[in-house]
Image (cartoon, rainbow, N blue to C red):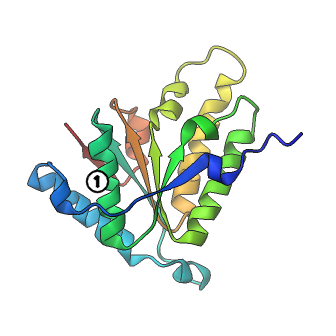
C-alpha cells in the first residue's frame, strides 16, 4: 500500500486576485509587502537553469492571529509579482514516519519551482513548536525537519511565506529575510 499522499493533498492553488486596496494594514506594512512582491517578481524559473545562479529563494514570516488578512496579503504579493500561489497544508505534510515529512516537503518545492509559484505555509508554527518539546524519539527529528524546510526555502528560486499565529523562536526569525506583523 502506498503511504505517500498525492501532491494535490499536500497543497492547493489559491486565488491570487487580491490587491493592495484589499488590505487594511498600516502603510509601512503595505510598503514592506510591496518590497517583497518586487523581489518575488524578479526571479524566473528560467534563470534557475542557467549558471551562475544568482537568485536564491527566501523566506518571509507572517506573524499574527488574523489568518484571513495574512492570506489576503499573500494573494496580493502573488498577484503583484504575477506568480501562482500555493497554500501548503502542513497537517498533510507532516508525518509520524521518520523521513516522510522531508520527502513531502521536497515534492512540494519541486512542484512549486516547476510552476514558478509562491508557497504559503499556513500554520507553520506546527513545525516551530516541536523544536523544544522532546518527549520521545520522534520529537528529536523535529529540528531536522525544520532545518530541511529552511534549506529547501533557500535552494528554491522563489518566495516561501510562513504564516504563524504566535511569535516564533529566535532561530526561525534569523532564517527568514522578512517578518511582517499583522494585528
Residue 18: x and y in percent read 28, 60
Left or right: 76, with 153 as reference point: left
Quadrant placement of the N terminus:
top right
Q: Which residue lies furthest to the top in this view?
A: 135
Identify the residue under disc 1. Answer: 73
Q: Which residue lies furthest to the right in this view?
A: 1
Residue 103: x and y in percent read 72, 48
102 over 183 or under it: above or below: below
CA neighbours of label 1 inside 10 A, class few (<14), some (14 to 19), many (20+): many
Residue at x-position 23% and y-position 64%: 34
Left or right: 24, with 79 as reference point: left
Residue at x-position 47% and y-position 38%: 124
Nearer-the-camera pick, 109 or 137: 109
Q: Is mark 1 on a helix, strand or loop?
A: helix
Residue 79: x and y in percent read 33, 67
Residue 150: x and y in percent read 53, 49
Q: Which residue lies furthest to the left in this view?
A: 27
Residue at x-position 48% and y-position 79%: 44
Nearer-the-camera pick, 22 or 44: 22
Q: In which quarter of the image is residue 98?
A: top right
Quadrant placement of the C terminus:
top left
- Number of numbered discs visible in the structure rendering: 1
Nearer-the-camera pick, 35 or 141: 35
145 over 157 or under it: above or below: above
Amino acid at each position: 500500500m502506498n503511504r505517500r499522499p498525492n501532491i494535490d493533498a499536500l497543497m492547493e492553488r489559491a486565488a491570487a486576485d487580491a490587491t493592495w486596496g484589499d488590505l487594511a494594514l498600516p502603510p509601512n506594512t503595505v510598503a514592506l509587502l510591496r518590497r517583497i512582491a518586487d523581489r518575488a517578481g524578479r526571479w524566473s524559473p528560467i534563470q534557475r537553469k542557467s549558471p551562475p545562479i544568482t537568485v536564491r529563494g527566501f523566506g518571509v514570516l507572517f506573524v499574527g492571529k488574523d489568518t484571513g488578512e495574512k492570506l489576503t496579503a499573500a494573494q496580493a504579493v502573488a498577484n503583484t509579482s504575477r506568480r501562482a500561489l500555493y497554500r501548503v497544508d502542513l497537517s498533510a505534510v507532516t508525518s509520524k514516519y521518520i523521513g516522510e515529512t522531508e520527502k513531502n516537503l521536497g515534492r512540494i518545492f519541486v512542484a512549486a519551482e516547476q510552476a514558478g509559484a509562491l508557497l504559503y505555509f499556513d500554520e507553520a508554527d506546527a513545525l516551530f513548536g516541536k523544536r523544544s518539546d522532546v518527549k520521545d524519539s520522534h520529537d528529536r527529528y523535529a529540528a531536522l525537519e525544520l532545518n530541511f524546510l529552511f534549506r529547501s526555502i533557500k535552494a528554491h528560486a522563489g518566495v516561501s511565506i510562513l504564516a504563524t499565529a504566535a511569535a516564533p523562536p529566535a532561530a526561525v526569525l534569523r532564517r527568514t529575510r522578512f517578518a511582517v506583523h499583522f494585528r
